[in-house]
Amino acid sequence: MLTLISTATASASSSLDITSGINSTYNEYQFHMVNIHAATGDSAFGFQFNAVGGSGFNETITSTAFKAEHAEDGSGQGLGYNTGEDQAEGTAYQRLTYLQQIANDEAYSGVLTVYDPSSTTYVKHFTAIGNYVHYSGKYSQNLFAAGYVNTTSALDEISFKMESGNIDAGTIYMYGVG
């Protein structure tokens, strides 16, 4: 069962930061991102965490990503590993898209799930799946990402942002799963 905890809505926002509500109430949290629209073309959308008492949204992440894509006109398709969207003990924002464009039909929607973020014993695993239009403007892409935040400190904050420019519009719903 999903319980809505909070809603964050972008309007030319440099980031959407959720700084309350992630605690030991639930062992699983989902972030439903709906129509995340970039203000600047050729920009990737991603997330990063803060541990309790931390600052700067710069936790260490190890992750992997792959994509499935299909051309609007049916001329091509593919499935492949995305080396540019993964991290090996990195502290950058974890990408959920490659290079988004700004047309109204090129927004991102997806779900990020974080498992047991309040644990002070184990690392924090996550999975994500979403869909957007590739920067070329002709491919619908599903990006799948998974990994872990390499800390045994509890996580209590998350930030979402574009790598360049603002989030022009979109909504992120945070749910507890129980």
Image (cartoon, rainbow, N blue to C red):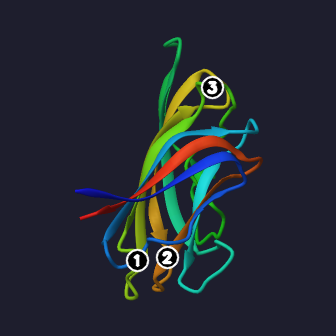
The disc label shown at residue 156, or none: 2
* Residues at marks 1 and 2, CA–CA distance in whole angstroms: 6 Å
Instruction: Name the residue rendered at 53%, 84% in the picture.
Output: 52
Identify the secondary structure beneath mark 3: loop
* Residues at marks 3 and 2, CA–CA distance in whole angstroms: 33 Å
Identify the secondary structure beneath mark 1: loop
Whether residue 162 is visible here, answered yes or no, is: yes
User: Which of the two discs, 1 and 2, labels the residue nearer the N terminus?
Assistant: 1
Q: Position of residue 61 (x, y in %)?
A: 55, 69
Whether residue 83 is visible here, answered yes or no, is: no
Other residues around mark 1 within 10 Å, as few (<14) / some (14–19) / many (≥20):
some
- Which residue type does callout 3 highlight? Asn
Q: Quadrant of the N terminus?
A: bottom left
- Identify residue for label 3: 104
- In depth, the one of 13 and 122 nearer the eye is 13
- Identify residue for label 1: 23
- In depth, the one of 174 and 152 nearer the eye is 174
Instruction: Name the residue rendered at 59%, 65% in the picture.
Output: 48
